[in-house]
Image (cartoon, helix red, strand yellow):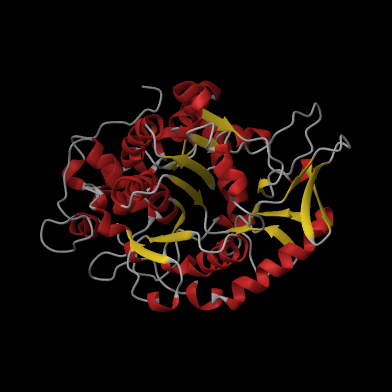
Amino acid sequence: MKAVFTIVAQNYYAQASTLYESIQKTNPGLDVYVFIAGKADKLDVNQSGARIVEISSLGIADLTDMAFKYDVTEFCTSVKPHCFIHLFETLGYEEVIYFDPDIFVYHDLAVIYRMLDSADIVVTPHILFPELEYTGSVPEGLLLFVGIFNLGFVAMKRSAVSASALQWWKVRLERLCFADKVDGLHVDQKWIDFLPVFCGSRLMISTHLGMNVSFWNLHERELKKEGGRFLVQRRNGSGETDPLVFYHFAKFDPLNAKIIHKDYKKVERATYSEYDDILAEYGKALLAHGHQEFVKIPYTYNFFDNGTPIVKFHRRLYRRLTETGVRFPDPFASGEGSFYRELDGNRLIDRSGARIDAASERDFAGFDKKIRILNRFFIALRTIIGAKNYFLLMKLFLRYCRPENQTFLIARYRDAYVFKNENQ
């Protein structure tokens, strides 16, 4: 028995529907599961051919804690091992593929299932080829940080090797599925760098050019169309060619036709114009599947039970407090003795209605002028305390400004404050 699954919150359901449609066109009859983070109350599950499963039905012991301390991306990735285990152990599937919801399948997935004949786990690296003068759009340092492999795709078969890897991975992600550069964590993905050591020859690192094509490897992969099908060829002229199996439309905005990735605006379509057709068609498909409506649906775990928004700063304070042994039976509660009351009593609840997590410093009016004023302040500070003390103070600020190190803002825990130093 074979299956494919993805994980989304409701606001990303247009991507999941588009993925499902692409699988049905290329792999008719293959079982597809969509695991929903939070409620599925806005979805008409009777109209979907995909099998809808709410994460809350999987019986995850620490679900409430995970849903609060993690943001939506962290949470959706943290439950990935649980979904694999559910499909293997509860539903009895033998071979399972995970795809991020923003993937589109162009080819028979038998090419992946055949890889599982000789391996227990299949992963794809972000890039395949070394360059003395790197030409990619994503800095190599960032690829080192986020991990060698892109976990928008992973395939596993049911075996002792995959079961052991999943249990290890599950425990790590229940505790440490943060996107945190200071701690060197990048959600579920960075952990998989250990698998070549843990799994040895039972892990296949696929070098198939047509798998997990995306903005981070377009510099090494050229798209061609021959005989009505898409092919991917290595750009160095060696002639290596594979069918396009799936493209990963990471952070693609269907309403902005000029860019490939909304956070990497310098990666323009004109640079990789041979991809223009599939980008345009994918954008149309997202809109046809209700992207503009679904994207407006609030994420279930973004609010306390009284409707007050939870911001990332709250999640990071909660992370630190629970790491030191503080317990809140229901962190989403707003009643007496709740985490919400602690925040509110210490003026850490914002009621302005601002989208704090989505904002950046560029959203401040007169930002450049404010920075110049702030710079003058620090120049004066350096003059007053001297270079050595200034350097030490800045070193301290690197850690002090982490939200996890701001628990002193809550009066109850001020005297028990313990500085979180990532070097310890």
Pick the front one: 424 or 130: 130
Camera-side residue of 304 and 246: 246
Q: Is residue 111 above or below residue 335?
A: above
Position of 21 compared to 54: left or right?
right
Q: Can residue 255 be seen here?
A: no
Q: Is residue 231 left or right of residue 186?
A: right
Instruction: State which quadrant residue 274 falls in.
Output: bottom right
What residue sits 50% from the left and 59% below the top?
Answer: 30
Percent x, y for residue 219? 78, 43
Residue 212 in the image, given as x and y percentages of width and height = 63, 47
Q: Is residue 349 left or right of residue 14?
A: left
Considering the image in quadrants, where does the C terminus appear? top left
- Count of marks, rendered view: 0
Q: Is residue 166 above or below residue 318?
A: above
- In x, y percent, where is residue 73? 45, 53
Q: Is residue 305 above or below residue 288?
A: above
Q: Which residue sits at x=55%, y=73%? A: 291
- Compare residues 306 and 2 and report the one nearer the observer: 2
Instruction: Tell me if residue 120 can be seen.
Output: yes
Describe residue 271's horizontal placement relative to residue 324 as left or right. Answer: right
Residue at 49%, 49% (x, y): give it. 98
Furthest residue to the right? 237
The correct choice, above or below, for 66 with respect to 161 in the image is: below
Res 81 quadrant in image: top left
In the depicted view, which residue is nearer to us: 142 or 360? 142
Q: How far from the left and from the top, in percent, is residue 121?
A: 49, 35
Q: Can you name the residue that lies furthest to the left here?
A: 336
